[in-house]
């Protein structure tokens, strides 16, 4: 269970442990600790800390919070209450009692509170109570990962409530165990993938379980966003449709990190009206939160001579070592498996130079380890045998590791929810803890360390999903029809009405489904379409990476990304091992690779074009026009560059790969040439200015929509045939769109204001990866005009301001 599920009240005293640890980290960086903290605190509350010689940009203190317990609800059976008491839970917190009581009363509910606030108890209480009072009732728990489901199942076993018979059902469950689970378990712990591929296609075998299904728990529901979230939204509708077929209407209990509009997101995800519980009644330790920007390295230059910062990974490794020397139990969150290993190695190197015995108390933790290895590491950290751990986000969700002295986050993890999930691992009792966000060379990170109110203030991002995306809706409707013929009532009330009807017409025309008076039918009784529908992919399919000498399958890459990441000659990393791609066959979906360790990396170079198919919305703002459109994005990887570790180009190798066309959605703006001239941009500077503005905007959109910059793309041109003017596109990277372009269109003013602030806040002279350079640019980050980007954005923002589309007081 989450640590916050325990009863009692925390002490209001907050020790200065967090600030003491920050002083140690600053000393290790070579800065003057007292001067740095004083300068950062003088910077004010709006990110105005002056940039000095040191790396500290902002310091904030999150005060401790005492918990507010509530009485046990009268409906909780004695055995359930006693089970929690044995685990040290003497009373629930207020949010736990409120959410549990709503669920017990039959209301669908989402509890959206902070890390370690005890969200587990909020759904365990109503489910266990229902299972205890109704011996026939069943329940289903869904988690986005197997590891999270396993942790929650272990916590339930420790509660030891009689006759619940909880069990896991995932890809690791043996065939004979699955038979037992289906026949005997009353609370099944699974994931959307298993529900999609195994349970729903064979629902007749699960009829007894579905008929008695009383509650469905959907944990960490904020992770269901984009294309994956859209698939899961339709998957849940399929589940509820089949449950209704067997006479059940289960109550939905969702748990989420603190995000914008949790009730709205939960309702879009489930198709039901969901009530949110957001007032957190659990105690919380105080925290010192530091925002850190690594220094520029004067002796190193990157692409096109751009300045380069010391890497966030190198800073995190040094901090992890310094904090372990102070005896602080510390987690360092990094962005990749390879980075976890390298960060642990770097920290051990720091410690070996000072106290070699401490080096053995630092380890890496990541996906790919065996379950018993992960459990051993978690246990060693909890007992204090390990003092430091470098980890991917594998320790962000669900695993009960809390009460640490410090957390170092190497690079903003993509959303505020993820940042606070990771930060929430720090904080123990009355002692304050330290949380450090180390900025990567990235526009988003640059913006946040200079504008801390965007991170430490109100939630800004919204979970985006689109269940009406035809590229998602089509395969899901086929799966639903194969499970149970679709009726017109299903189309109208379950799957979204007119968009679903239009997709069904296409499926019938393509002879995928058949239309009869009673509805739509899947024509085969032997084939199950779910096995060919990847709910985590783009819908284009996967390319398997196969070792040519052994036939061993190493992994997969998305079909749309394969030309850029798995082209012939590409260097591919898998679990710390390096391979080179020999051949890519997009028709068969196979890339052949061989083991190699070259002393270079590879970057693809591509061409792209955007054709506007249909304008969905358009606003004419005088010199600026803003639109949302359906577009065809045609791209072709034409070459790749071999680069040395310092970024210099060793060779450019041409490639002959086919064009790929993606039909998706895009937000775009176009500008009158005269307005650009009036802003000081002659025609020769316009391409670089638009290109730089496009790159920076792509880097900042994840601040407003829960996406990664790799989920979106863009194009800029000084003359586009559709608009006849200079134009910038930012488009979804998924077929049909994932909702990110719509979100960008809705928040264009705040989004572009943040983009301009990020460019202006970067201390480089002419553009760098922290502001206008992009790691995925197909044109080698040329041309780019940093000052011109500010001018372009100024013209657009001025037009949006006149229309009232920029928030009052926005700084740009």
Image (tube, helix red, strand yellow):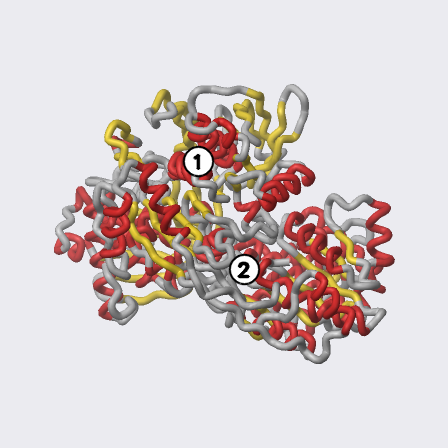
| Nearer-the-camera pick, 776 or 211 | 211
| Nearer-the-camera pick, 458 or 231 | 458
Q: Which mark is residue 629?
A: none
Looking at the rendered structure, the secondary structure element under dot 2 is helix
Quadrant housing the N terminus: bottom right
| Nearer-the-camera pick, 81 or 520 | 81
2 or 1: mark nearer the eye: 1
* Residue at image location 86% in from the left, 51% down from the top: 179
Q: Which mark is residue 321?
A: 1
Q: Is residue 80 above or below residue 645?
A: below
| Location of residue 489 (image quadrant) | bottom right
Looking at the rendered structure, the secondary structure element under dot 1 is helix
Q: Is residue 363 left or right of residue 600?
A: right
Quadrant housing the C terminus: bottom left
Q: Which residue is mark 2?
A: 222
* Residue at image location 61% in from the left, 34% down from the top: 555
* Residue at image location 63% in from the left, 68% down from the top: 122
Spot occupied by residue 681 in the image (x, y as percentages of width and height): 15, 49
* Residue at image location 67% in from the left, 21% down from the top: 550
Q: Earlier in the sequence, mark 2 or mark 1?
A: 2
């Amino acid at each position: 269970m989450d640590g916050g599920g325990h009863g009692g009240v925390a002490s209001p005293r907050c020790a200065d442990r967090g600030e003491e640890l920050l002083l140690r980290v600053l000393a290790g960086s070579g800065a003057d600790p007292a001067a740095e903290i004083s300068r950062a605190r003088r910077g004010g509350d709006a990110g105005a800390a002056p940039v000095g010689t040191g790396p500290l940009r902002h310091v904030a203190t999150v005060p401790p919070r005492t918990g507010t317990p509530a009485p046990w609800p009268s409906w909780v059976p004695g055995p359930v209450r006693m089970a929690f008491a044995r685990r040290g839970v003497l009373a629930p917190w207020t949010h736990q009692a409120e959410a549990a009581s709503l669920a017990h009363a039959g209301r669908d509910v989402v509890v959206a509170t902070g890390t370690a606030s005890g969200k587990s108890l909020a759904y365990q209480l109503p489910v266990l109570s229902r299972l205890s009072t109704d011996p026939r009732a069943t329940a289903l728990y869904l988690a986005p990962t197997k590891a999270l489901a396993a942790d929650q199942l272990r916590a339930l076993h420790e509660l030891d409530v009689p006759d619940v018979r909880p069990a896991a059902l995932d890809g690791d469950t043996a065939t004979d165990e699955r038979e037992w689970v289906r026949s005997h378990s009353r609370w099944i712990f699974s994931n959307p993938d298993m529900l999609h591929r195994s349970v729903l296609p064979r629902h007749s075998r699960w009829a007894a379980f579905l008929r008695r299904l009383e509650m469905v728990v959907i944990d960490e529901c904020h992770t269901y966003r984009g294309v994956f979230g859209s698939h899961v939204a339709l998957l849940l509708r399929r589940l509820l449709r089949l449950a209704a077929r067997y006479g059940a209407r289960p109550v939905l209990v969702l748990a989420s990190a603190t995000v914008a509009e949790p009730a709205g997101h939960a309702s879009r995800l489930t198709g039901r009206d969901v009530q949110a519980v957001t007032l957190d009644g659990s105690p919380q330790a105080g925290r010192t939160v530091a925002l850190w920007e690594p220094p520029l390295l004067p002796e190193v230059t990157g692409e096109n001579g751009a300045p380069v910062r010391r890497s966030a990974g190198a800073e995190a490794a040094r901090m992890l070592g310094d904090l372990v020397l102070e005896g602080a139990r510390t987690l360092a969150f990094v962005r990749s498996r390879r980075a976890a290993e390298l960060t642990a190695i770097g920290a051990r190197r720091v410690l070996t130079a000072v106290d070699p015995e401490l080096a053995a108390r630092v380890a890496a933790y990541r996906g790919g380890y065996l379950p018993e290895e992960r459990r051993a590491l978690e246990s060693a950290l909890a007992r204090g045998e390990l003092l430091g751990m470098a980890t991917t986000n594998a320790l962000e969700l669900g695993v009960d590791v809390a009460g640490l002295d410090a957390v170092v986050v190497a690079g903003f993890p993509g959303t505020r929810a993820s940042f606070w999930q990771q930060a929430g691992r720090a904080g123990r009792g009355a002692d304050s803890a330290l949380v450090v966000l180390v900025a990567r060379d990235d526009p988003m990170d640059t913006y946040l360390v200079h504008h801390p109110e965007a991170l430490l203030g109100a939630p800004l991002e919204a979970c985006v999903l689109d269940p009406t995306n035809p590229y998602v809706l089509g395969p899901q409707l086929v799966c639903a029809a194969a499970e149970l013929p679709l009726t017109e009532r299903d189309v109208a009330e379950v799957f979204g009405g007119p968009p679903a009807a239009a997709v069904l017409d296409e499926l019938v025309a393509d002879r995928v489904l058949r239309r009869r008076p009673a509805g739509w039918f899947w024509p085969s009784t032997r084939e199950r379409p779910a096995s060919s529908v990847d709910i985590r992919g783009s819908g284009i399919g996967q390319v398997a990476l196969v070792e040519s000498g052994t036939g061993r399958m190493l992994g997969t890459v998305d079909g749309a990304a394969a030309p850029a990441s798995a082209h012939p000659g590409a260097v591919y990393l898998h679990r710390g091992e390096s391979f080179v791609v020999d051949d890519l066959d997009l028709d068969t979906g196979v890339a052949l690779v061989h083991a190699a360790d070259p002393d270079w990396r590879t970057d693809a170079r591509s061409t792209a074009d955007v054709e506007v198919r249909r304008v969905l919305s358009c606003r004419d703002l005088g010199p600026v026009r803003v639109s949302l459109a359906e577009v065809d994005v045609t791209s072709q990887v034409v070459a790749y560059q071999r680069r040395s570790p310092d970024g210099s180009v060793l060779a450019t190798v041409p490639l002959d790969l086919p064009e790929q066309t993606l039909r998706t959605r895009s937000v775009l703006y176009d500008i009158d040439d005269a307005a650009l001239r009036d802003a000081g941009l002659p025609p020769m500077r316009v391409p670089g200015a638009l290109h730089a503005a496009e790159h920076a905007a792509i880097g900042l959109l994840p601040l407003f929509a829960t996406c990664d910059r790799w989920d979106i793309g863009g194009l800029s041109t000084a003359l586009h045939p559709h608009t006849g003017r200079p134009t910038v596109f930012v488009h979804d990277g998924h077929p049909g769109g994932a909702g990110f372009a719509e979100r960008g269109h809705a928040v264009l003013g705040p989004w572009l204001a943040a983009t301009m602030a990020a460019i202006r806040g970067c201390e480089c002279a002419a553009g760098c990866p922290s502001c206008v350079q992009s790691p995925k640019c197909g044109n080698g980050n040329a041309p780019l005009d940093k000052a011109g980007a500010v001018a372009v954005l100024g013209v657009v923002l001025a037009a949006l301001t006149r229309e009232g589309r920029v928030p009052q007081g926005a700084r740009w």
